Image (cartoon, grey):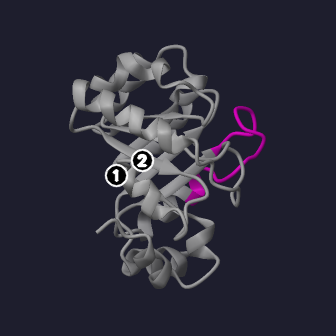
């Protein structure tokens, strides 16, 4: 794992995106604190932690010590999103809200001016290697209009099924940050990261 982290950092990744799944909010379990600690120790780029869990506060407390740049939590699993956002601010972590492909933008409309990023899932969360859902591009464009009105500095991140075939469409849909896993790790890191560049 050390070699993999070093490789993607050197290849030009801007952040290390870490998916956390609890087996309850999504039907899969991924990594825990031991692995995140190891990633944080080796990474020379900021951590971008995406928690797909039922109890956001437990996992925020678990990972805050590793000083991630962002923690994204799902609006679908949180009854008190404003409290979570305020907690992340106090921990000096940039708050981000994640929404599933079928979740309407209206569910987060009242929170856009309070977060630094919105993570749009372009696959259904829970498993890697899924096909990109192109309908999410329209959601990105809709979200960008709201961001311009409410919080122009808020970023849009997209995650799921991203590769060289769809990166141009993603960029043209006003997405700022593209997350890619399988496309990069199943082949040479440097070539794949460069092919996804927004520059």
180, 165: nearer the viewer: 165
Could you tell me residue 12's position as x and y percent? Answer: 36, 75
Could you tell me residue 16's position as x and y percent? Answer: 44, 61
Query: Which residue corresponds to the image point at 47% horizontal and 44% vertical from the top-left?
Result: 63
Q: Would you say 25 lies left or right of 117 here?
A: right
Check residue 157 in the rendering and tell me which mark sits there, or answer none. 2
Figure quadrant of the N terminus: bottom right
Q: Please tell me whether the stretch drawn in magenta is mainly helix, strand or loop.
A: loop
42, 190: nearer the viewer: 190
Query: Which residue corresponds to the image point at 68% horizontal and 42% vertical from the top-left?
Result: 124
Question: In the rendered image, which quarter is residue 88 located in?
Answer: top left
Whether residue 141 is visible to the viewer of this picture, yes or no, is: yes
Check residue 176 in the rendering and tell me which mark sits there, or answer none. 1
Q: Magenta segment: does it hold 27?
A: yes
Q: Would you say 154 lies left or right of 193 here?
A: left
Check residue 108 in the rendering and tell me which mark sits there, or answer none. none
Question: In the rendered image, which quarter is residue 112 located in?
Answer: top left
Figure quadrant of the C terminus: bottom left
Q: Magenta segment: does it hold 40?
A: no
Is there a contact, CB below 8 Å, between mark 2 and mark 1? yes
Query: Which residue corresponds to the image point at 40% horizontal and 80% vertical from the top-left?
Result: 11
94, 136: nearer the viewer: 136
Query: Which residue corresponds to the image point at 39% horizontal and 20% vertical from the top-left?
Result: 109
Q: Residue furthest right?
A: 27
Task: Report helix, strand or loop for mark 2.
Answer: strand
Task: Report helix, strand or loop for mark 1.
Answer: loop
Could you tell me residue 130's position as x and y percent? Answer: 70, 56
Could you tell me residue 170's position as x and y percent? Answer: 45, 55
113 to 187, vertically: above or below:
above
The span shown in magenta is 21-35
Characterize the local packing of mark 2: few (<14), some (14-19) or many (20 or more) Cα atoms within 10 angstroms: many
């Amino acid at each position: 794992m050390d070699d993999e982290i070093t490789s993607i950092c050197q290849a030009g990744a801007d952040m290390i995106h870490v998916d956390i799944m609890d087996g309850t909010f999504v039907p899969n379990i991924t990594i825990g604190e031991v692995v995140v600690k190891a990633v944080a120790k080796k990474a020379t780029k900021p951590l971008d932690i995406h928690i797909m869990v039922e109890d956001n506060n437990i996992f925020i407390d678990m990972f805050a010590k590793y000083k991630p740049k962002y923690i994204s939590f799902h609006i679908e699993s949180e009854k008190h999103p404003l409290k979570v956002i305020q907690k992340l601010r106090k921990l000096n972590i940039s708050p981000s809200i994640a929404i599933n492909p079928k979740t309407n933008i209206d569910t987060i409309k009242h929170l856009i001016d309070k977060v630094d990023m919105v993570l749009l899932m372009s696959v259904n969360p829970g498993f890697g290697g899924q096909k990109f859902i192109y309908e999410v591009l329209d959601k990105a464009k809709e979200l960008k209009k709201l961001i311009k009105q409410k919080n122009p500095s808020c970023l849009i991140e997209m995650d799921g099924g991203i590769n060289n075939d769809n990166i141009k469409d993603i960029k043209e849909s006003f997405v700022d940050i593209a997350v890619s896993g399988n496309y990069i790790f199943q082949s040479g890191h440097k070539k794949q990261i460069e092919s996804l560049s927004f520059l």
